Each structure stands twice: as C-alpha cells, then as structure tokens.
C-alpha cells in the first residue's frame, strides 16, 4: 500500500558533518599517500567503531554493536520496523575519507536534526555502520550478516591476503562464526534502507550533477591468469626465437577494447590491475606472467559473454606462444 506524506524541509549543519568526517578520517590516515587504511576487523577499524559508538551515545541513541561489528544507533520505538540509514566504516587500502564514512555520518547528522527540531517519527530510525564491507575476507560481511546471507562454511574458511582467518579476526574482538550468524535481521524489522555514498567515478562531476541514483551494482568475475613462455637471456636470444610471456599479456591487453566493443555495453569494464613477471629481471625474457583480470557488468548475461570472449582471446594467444 502506498502511503502519502506531507514533506517538510530541514537543514543539516554542514560544519558539523565536516568536523565529524575529519575526526573519523584520523583513524587509519596515512601521512605519506594521504589515504585511509582502515581494513575491516583490525584494531584501527575497531577504534573507529568505538569512537562512533561514543558519538551515538552522546546523541542519546540506543547504541549497540552486533556479532560481526556492525555499529547501530537507534532513535524511536523499539518494537517497530526501522528506516535504516547507513554505509560502511572500513576502508580499502588508501581509501578516501568520504567513502562509506559519509553515508554513516550524514545519517547521524539527520538524527541530530530530528532531535533538535523535535520532529515526530513515523518510523524509528537507525544509523548503521556496517563491518568489513570492503572485502578484506572476500565478502561483504556486515551487510551479508544483516541479510542472513552468511554461510557457516565460508565463515570458517575465509582468509585475508596475509592468510589470517576471518574467524580468528572475529575472535580478537570477542566475536565468532556463531555471533556472526546471529546478527541476521528479519525483513520485518527493517522498513527501508537508505545509503548516501560518494560517487566512485568521474561521471557526475563531468556532467556537473550534484547527485545521482544508483541503478544497480555490477556483477564481477575475477581471474588470476598465468601465461607461460620461456625465460631466456635477453642478449643472446634472437627476437624471432623467443617465447616471451609478457608479449602474450600485451597482445591480450590490446584486445580488451575490442572485446568490450563487440560483447559489452557502456557499463562493461575489464581491468588488469596486477601483473607479475617472472623471473622479473631486466636482462631476462619473462618466462611467466601472472596477472589479475576483473570483469564487471550490471547484466549477468553480458558478464558471461565478456568472460567467454576473454577466454577465447587468451586461448588464441596461448597457442601462438606455444
Ligand atoms: Zn564505499
């Protein structure tokens, strides 16, 4: 059933939001590259969460942390479905100060204004700062926990890039697979979820628009590709007698724009973000190259087409190199 509302407009205090953003950015700020390093379930991430909880308490919100580290501040009746405002508090390595943080702190500012203006709430409002959303352990832990989308097997086996188990990271903060599974929220307890998020790309700025609405989140495939050639001396091996693994990568990279044009859409992305040449010596022909390939699109069928085209291009190149 559609409900109709009369709309009143209130102003938020931009200065207050700005001050909060700078305070939060201190958790994990790196002087050298000016980025934020606040990976999920680390000491610094947890310190930021404690800071936020103190802020919530200072505003008189019912404040809690669930069994995966999601921080929740709630205003209004405890027995009704809530309108939830939130985003993530963790960051990718060298993240920006608005990423995630903005969606949480703007929610907090809304609740401050609601209280100051004595606005009567039709629904209780919660601000949630989700936990480990940036994929240190390969998932979106906080949101998955809320949605009841966590699998015990995954919780037990997931590891970060340094080999640390998710379950061990949880244990450091008195949480576990068990508490994670119990952080599920019932669909009845949430009326709506609103997230304000900084745009990750250059499009709005280029089109001089202040805000846009998300149409979807792209699906993804992530491959680690290995091309094997033959390592040889860079001086004594004639150019026509080489099996240079890097040249295979270069040929494939050159195909990327063609693949997108033929198989993709304007929403398609193919990215080689990491490359390792072996042995990795300036005077040796690379005998092996390992690289990451990430494909993205909003449409699963298109994603599949992109993956197939990449597979085809790679096998053609691999045969040539043989
Ligand atoms: Zn984000």
Image (cartoon, rainbow, N blue to C red):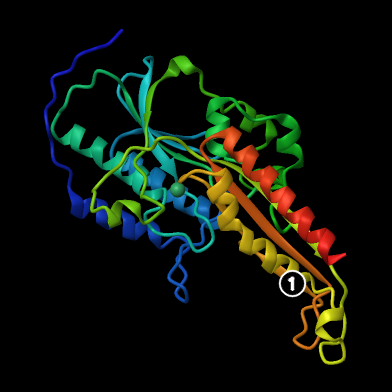
Vertically, is 181 above or below 100?
above
For numbered disc 1, what is the local secondary structure? helix
Horizontal arrangement in the rendering, residue 173 relative to residue 202 (left or right): right
- For this orientation, the residue located farthest to the top is 1
Residue 241 image point, x, y percent: 87, 79
Note whether residue 174 is visible.
no
> Residue at point 84% right, 86% down?
238
Rendering coords of residue 261 (x, y %): 53, 50
**Residue that carries the numbered disc 1 in the rendered image:** 246
Q: Quadrant of the C terminus?
A: bottom right
User: Which of the pair 43/88 is nearer the observer?
Assistant: 88
Q: Does residue 210 sit above or below 143 in this rendering?
A: below
Q: Is residue 45 left or right of residue 101?
A: right
Residue at 40% across / 63% down in the picture?
Answer: 26
Q: Quadrant of residue 245?
A: bottom right
Q: Is 319 on the left-hand or right-hand side of 101?
A: right
The residue sitting at 42% across, 59% down in the picture is: 96
Question: Of 197 and 30, which appears nearest the observer?
Answer: 197
Looking at the image, which is closer to me, 228 or 140? 228
Total label count?
A: 1
Above or below for 231 versus 200 = below
Image-quadrant location for residue 161: bottom right
Tell me where residue 59 appears, x and y as whole percent.
28, 39
């Amino acid at each position: 059933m559609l409900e109709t509302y009369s709309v009143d407009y209130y102003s938020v205090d931009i200065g207050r939001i700005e001050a909060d953003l700078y305070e939060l950015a201190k958790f994990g700020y790196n002087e050298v590259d000016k980025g934020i390093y606040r990976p999920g379930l680390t000491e610094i991430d947890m310190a930021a969460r404690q800071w936020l909880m103190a802020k919530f308490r200072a505003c008189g919100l019912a404040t809690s942390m669930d069994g995966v580290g999601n921080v929740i501040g709630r205003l209004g009746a405890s027995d009704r479905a809530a309108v939830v405002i939130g985003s993530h508090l963790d960051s990718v390595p060298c993240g920006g100060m608005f990423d995630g943080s903005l969606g949480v702190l703007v929610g907090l500012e809304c609740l401050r204004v609601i209280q100051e203006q004595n606005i009567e709430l039709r629904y209780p409002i919660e601000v949630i700062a989700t936990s480990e959303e940036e994929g240190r352990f390969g998932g979106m832990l906080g949101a998955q926990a809320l949605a009841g989308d966590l699998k015990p097997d995954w919780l037990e086996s997931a590891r970060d890039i340094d080999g640390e188990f998710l379950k061990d990271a949880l244990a450091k903060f008195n949480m576990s697979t068990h508490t994670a599974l119990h952080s599920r929220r019932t669909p009845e307890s949430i009326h709506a979820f609103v997230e304000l998020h900084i745009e990750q790309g250059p499009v709005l700025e280029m089109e001089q628009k202040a805000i846009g609405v998300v149409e979807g989140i792209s699906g993804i495939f992530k491959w680690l590709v290995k091309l094997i050639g033959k390592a040889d001396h860079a001086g004594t091996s004639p150019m026509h007698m080489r099996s240079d693994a890097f040249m295979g990568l270069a040929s494939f990279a050159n195909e990327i724009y063609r693949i997108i044009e033929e198989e993709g859409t304007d929403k398609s992305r193919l990215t080689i973000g990491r490359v390792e040449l072996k042995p990795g010596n300036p005077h040796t022909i690379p005998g092996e190259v390992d690289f990451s390939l990430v494909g993205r699109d909003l449409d699963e069928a298109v994603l599949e087409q992109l993956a197939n085209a990449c597979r085809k291009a790679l096998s053609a190149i691999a045969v040539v190199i043989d």
